[in-house]
Image (spheres, rainbow, N blue to C red):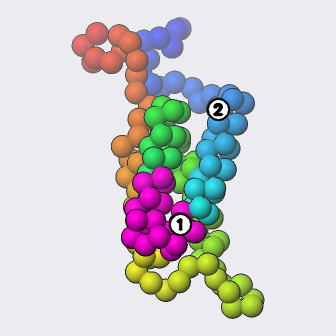
Amino acid sequence: MSDRGASMLAQPFRPPSAARVAAYLGLFVLGTVTGFTGALVQGGWFPGGLLLALAGAAGLFLGGARAARSRAGAVAPAAGWVVTVVFLTATRPEGDFLFGAGGGSYLFLLGGMALAVICATIGAGRQPEGDQVRLGK
């Protein structure tokens, strides 16, 4: 029996290709770079740096979703961003930390997480293509 007429939910699971895995890993690395640079920029040029850092993060999350044509394209850089930012908020044994206790730091943390959720939500999910789009066909 052909899988052409079956629903997308009834399709068997296939692991992603090596190129797709490499793309997601690249997006993860871009997320870590964006998180690190955003952490530096948001504190250096407040409030313009905060807006620039959040715009860069939103552009990466939404761009990843559009480029991969899946929500995982937004989740991969968001995961890299969150891991990096949370790692940078932890204090070191010497007592040093990168983020200050100001409102800008909290806006960067919470705003970036909210942007990650928004971009992953509005990113393109698994959608049927071609004649299978309409139920009546």
Q: Which of 77 and 100 is in front in this view?
A: 100
**Mark 1, secondary structure of its residue:** helix
Q: Give the quarter of the image for residue 14.
A: top right
Amino acid bearing label 2: Arg
Q: Residue 50: which disc? A: none
Q: How crowded is mark 2: few (under 14 residues within 10 Å), some or many (20 or more)?
A: few
- Which circle's residue, 1 or 2, is located before the other in the chain? 2
Q: Where is residue 115 in the image (x, y as percent from the top left)?
A: 41, 56
Q: Do the residues labelled 1 and 2 touch (CB within 8 Å)?
A: no
Amino acid bearing label 1: Val
**Mark 2, secondary structure of its residue:** helix
Q: Nearer the viewer, residue 131 or 120?
A: 120
Disc 1 versus disc 2: distance between alpha carbons? 31 Å
Q: Position of residue 53 (x, y in %)?
A: 48, 60
Q: How crowded is mark 1: few (under 14 residues within 10 Å), some or many (20 or more)?
A: some
Q: Give the quarter of the image for residue 87.
A: bottom right
Q: Is residue 43 magenta?
A: yes
Residue linked to disc 2: 20
Q: Where is residue 67 in the image (x, y as percent from the top left)?
A: 51, 32
Q: Which residue shows up at 42% across the image and 12% down it?
A: 5
Q: Which residue shows up at 58% across the image and 48% down it?
A: 76
Q: Give the quarter of the image for residue 97.
A: bottom right
Q: Which of marks 1 and 2 is in front?
A: 1
Residue linked to disc 1: 41
Q: Position of residue 59 (x, y in %)?
A: 45, 47
Which residues fall within the magenta stretch?
A: 38-57
